[in-house]
Amino acid sequence: MAKKSWFERNKRKAATVKKYAAVRAELKAKRDYAGLAKLPRDASPTRLVNRCAMSGRRHGHLRKFGVSRLTFREAALNGLIPGVTKASW
């Protein structure tokens, strides 16, 4: 399980990205790169990290389900994810 501070830091970054989204789009349209550089670093969407909703793991994140591969496997084998079955051939 990830530390709680990592979750909170990512939430704060997401709020900053949302706050400056319109300003960034306007500056990009004008090609004002000096203005973009003056914005906070956390205003860039690339600073956000995809994290598992259950464990907080950031590697092996499955975007479609919002969880890591390990959590996905456990949940799928326990039947907690509808429509997902173990493959057999």
Image (cartoon, rainbow, N blue to C red):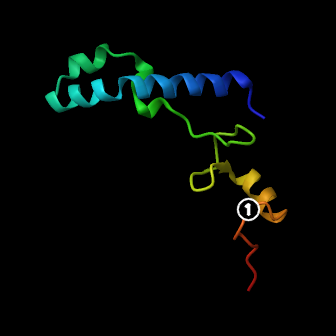
The residue positioned 77% from the left and 63% from the top of the image is 76
Position in image of residue 80 (x %, y %):
79, 60
Tell whether 10 sits left or right of 88: left
Which residue was labeled with disc 1? 81
Please tell me how crowded label 1 is: few (under 14), some (14-19), or many (20+) other residues with Cα within 10 Å.
Answer: some
Position in image of residue 10 (x %, y %):
58, 27
The residue type indicated by label 1 comes to Ile
Instruction: Locate residue 78: give its quadrant.
Output: bottom right
Image quadrant where one finds the C terminus? bottom right
Does residue 55 lie above or below 15 as drawn?
below
Does residue 30 lie above or below 72 as drawn?
above
Image quadrant where one finds the N terminus? top right
Does residue 79 lie above or below 10 as drawn?
below
Residue most extreme to the right: 78
Q: Secondary structure at mark 1?
A: loop
Tell whether 84 sits left or right of 23: right
Figure label count: 1
Position in image of residue 14 (x %, y %):
50, 28
Instruction: Locate residue 24: give its quadrant.
Output: top left
The residue positioned 40% from the left and 27% from the top of the image is 44
The residue positioned 67% from the left and 49% from the top of the image is 67
Residue 20 or residue 40, whichever sits in front? 20
The residue positioned 72% from the left and 66% from the top of the image is 82
Residue most extreme to the bottom: 89
Residue most extreme to the top: 38
